[in-house]
């Protein structure tokens, strides 16, 4: 199995990606997560201004068959939410790394994103999960 | 009908010794080749989806789909008294079945709750085949074996029998190309017959779990790949897609077909589950009759109803159902997005009095009350 793992992102063990963008961090779920979930039918996201804690759930993604929690990769404040997902959750299936992004967090510690896995480490994590 | 005298599947014995490894159907390699995501299901590694549940679901509603359901149990009861024994174990009246006809029924315990839901096939007056849920195989095999004792012969054909479901509006067109099946095409719903397709001797039943026209094909365990590959190939021009357990579940839910372990189990009786039509009190005594008669006389306390989410949320098995005032009145037994309707639908038990169509309810989706309304079922019915 080989799924797309872009080189310019950071990753979590829960199959989320984080992309540093000028002091803020854009968050989404990886192609692997999308493949596992199947057809995504509902995305629940917090409101702008919500404070999130690293490792704590901040939303849910539901597919036809399952429900998964979203865990904040870093602590901070939600500054933007992908509103398009509320009426078009299938955007996540269409583009896990672009139009399917979930939220943008303003991290309380700008360096926190660096503690996440790099692409090589995430690829290893995927290999380990496959066995 | 089902070919006899074949060595048992050795994997079964192995699994019994080690009690750990998942069993594989004879189509395992086919599934992997087709890119299926395999999941453990009642002791088997089964395909949950191939291309995607929505796409597979729609293929069955508009073209056709192929399912591996070889994990299901096949039991045979034979002998002069076989019919009487089976009729005593089930709630529907198999005494009225003709040769080559099958019937859907519940099998209850003496408390009148459901041990399993089955299809009973009458091959001849002395020979019946019972198809049970994989999850209940051991339990049901034990019940039938015990009842057979001294009265008739019980044979468990699960390990030697593969089962492939070909379902959808194009199903019969695909089957027609697989061999001389004119007699199968002429069968009514729940009729079945022996046939030879793709050089394999099979038994074909006009049954299914999708709400569409189609067949279920019983074949010898090791011949299943030949049947599967042949049908996949012949079905190409008819839009055939391999379909997994996920699509099987959404298809049956739209038709309000009960799923054992979700909507019915040993805590529910057929009358409250909307399966009163499978209980024939006038056929003579049967297991559970006394209790069920009592329930019928006093009326059921709750009913399995269908609902549609009007708020934003997907109901899942186990979520509490609340009255519009917010008091817990029942629980969701099945819930999912409906690919055909484009709505989120579900089933659940509510008290009689709260079960009228149009009644607003709330579904507690992990702490959030989401509005829903009780609707008429089935959610989907195919145009005849």
Image (cartoon, coloured by chain):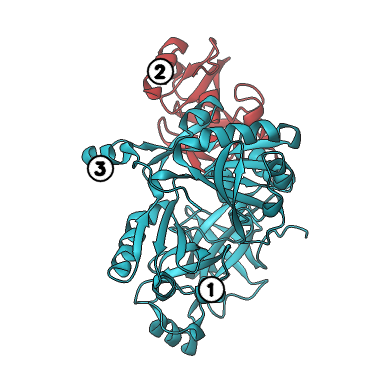
Chain colours: A red, B cyan
In the rendered image, is residue A46 in sight?
no
Q: Viewed as shown, does residue B221 lie left or right of A64?
A: left
Label 2 crowd bin: few (<14), some (14–19), many (20+), radius 10 Å: few
- Asked if B309 appears above or below B197 in the picture, the reply is below
Which secondary structure lies at badge 1?
helix
- Residue at 60% of width from left, 57% of height from top? B192
Q: Viewed as shown, does residue B225 lie left or right of B378?
A: left
Quarter assignment of residue B208: bottom right
Q: Viewed as shown, does residue A57 lie left or right of A37?
A: left
Q: Nearest the camera: B141 or A77?
A: B141
- Residue at 67% of width from left, 53% of height from top? B184
Check if mark 1 and mark 2 are on a common chain.
no
- The x and y percentages for residue B332 are 50, 61
Image marks 1 and 2: residues in contact by CB distance under 8 Å: no
- Asked if B252 appears above or below B105 in the picture, the reply is above
Distance of label 3 from label 1 (alpha carbons): 35 Å
Which residue is denoted by mark 3 in the rendering?
A: B16
- Label 3 marks a residue whose chain is B
Q: Nearest the camera: B62 or B305?
A: B62
Label located before the other in sequence (3 or 1): 3
Image marks 3 and 2: residues in contact by CB distance under 8 Å: no
Nearest to viewer (mark 3 / mark 2): 3
- Residue at 32% of width from left, 67% of height from top? B148
Q: Nearest the camera: B264 or B173?
A: B173
Which residue is denoted by mark 2 in the rendering?
A: A127
Figure label count: 3
Q: Nearest the camera: B113 or A86?
A: B113
Which residue is denoted by mark 1 in the rendering?
A: B278
Which secondary structure lies at badge 3?
helix
- Asked if B273 appears above or below A120 in the picture, the reply is below
- Label 1 marks a residue whose chain is B
């Amino acid at each position: 199995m080989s799924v797309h793992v872009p080189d310019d992102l950071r990753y979590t063990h829960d199959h989320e990606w984080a992309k540093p963008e000028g002091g803020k961090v854009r968050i989404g779920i990886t192609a692997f997560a999308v493949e596992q979930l199947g057809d995504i039918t509902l995305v629940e996201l917090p409101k702008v201004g919500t404070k999130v804690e690293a490792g704590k759930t901040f939303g849910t993604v539901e597919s036809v068959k399952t429900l998964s929690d979203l865990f904040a990769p870093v602590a901070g404040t939600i500054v933007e939410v992908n509103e398009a997902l509320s009426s078009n959750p299938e955007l996540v299936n269409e583009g896990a790394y672009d139009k399917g992004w979930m939220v943008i967090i303003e991290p309380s510690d700008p360096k926190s994103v660096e503690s996440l896995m790099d692409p090589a480490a995430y690829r290893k994590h995927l290999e380990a999960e496959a066995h | 009908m089902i070919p006899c005298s074949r060595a048992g599947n050795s994997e079964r014995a192995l699994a019994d010794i080690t009690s750990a490894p998942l069993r594989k159907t004879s189509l395992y390699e086919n599934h992997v080749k087709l890119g299926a995501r395999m999941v453990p299901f009642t002791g088997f590694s089964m395909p949950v989806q191939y291309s995607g549940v929505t796409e597979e679901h729609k293929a069955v509603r508009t073209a056709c789909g192929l399912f591996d359901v070889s994990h299901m149990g096949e039991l045979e009861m034979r002998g002069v008294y076989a019919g009487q024994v089976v009729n005593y174990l089930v709630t529907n009246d198999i005494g009225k079945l003709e040769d080559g006809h099958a019937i859907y029924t519940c099998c209850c315990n003496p408390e009148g709750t459901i041990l399993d839901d089955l299809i009973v096939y009458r091959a001849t007056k002395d020979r019946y085949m019972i198809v049970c849920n994989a999850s209940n195989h051991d339990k049901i095999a034990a019940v039938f074996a015990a009842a057979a004792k001294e009265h008739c012969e019980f044979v468990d054909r699960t390990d030697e029998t593969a089962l492939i479901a070909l379902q959808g509006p194009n199903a019969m067109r695909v089957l027609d190309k697989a061999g001389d099946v004119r007699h199968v095409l002429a069968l009514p719903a729940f009729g079945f017959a022996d046939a030879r397709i793709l050089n394999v001797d099979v038994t074909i039943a006009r049954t299914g779990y999708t709400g569409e026209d189609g067949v279920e094909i019983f074949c010898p365990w090791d011949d299943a790949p030949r049947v599967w590959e042949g049908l996949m190939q012949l079905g190409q021009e008819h839009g055939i897609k391999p379909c997994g357990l996920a699509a099987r579940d959404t298809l049956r839910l739209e038709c309000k077909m009960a799923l054992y372990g979700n909507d019915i189990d040993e805590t529910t009786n057929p009358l409250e589950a909307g399966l009163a039509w499978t209980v024939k009190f006038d056929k003579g005594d049967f297991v559970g009759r006394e209790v069920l008669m009592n329930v019928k006389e006093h009326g059921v306390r709750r009913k399995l109803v269908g609902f549609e989410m009007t708020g934003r949320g997907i109901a899942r098995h186990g979520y509490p159902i609340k009255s519009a005032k917010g008091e817990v009145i029942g629980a969701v037994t099945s819930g999912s997005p409906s690919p055909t309707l484009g709505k989120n639908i579900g089933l659940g038990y509510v008290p009689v009095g709260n079960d009228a169509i149009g009644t607003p309810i709330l579904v507690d989706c992990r702490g959030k009350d989401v509005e829903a309304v009780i609707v008429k079922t089935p959610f989907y019915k195919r145009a005849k």
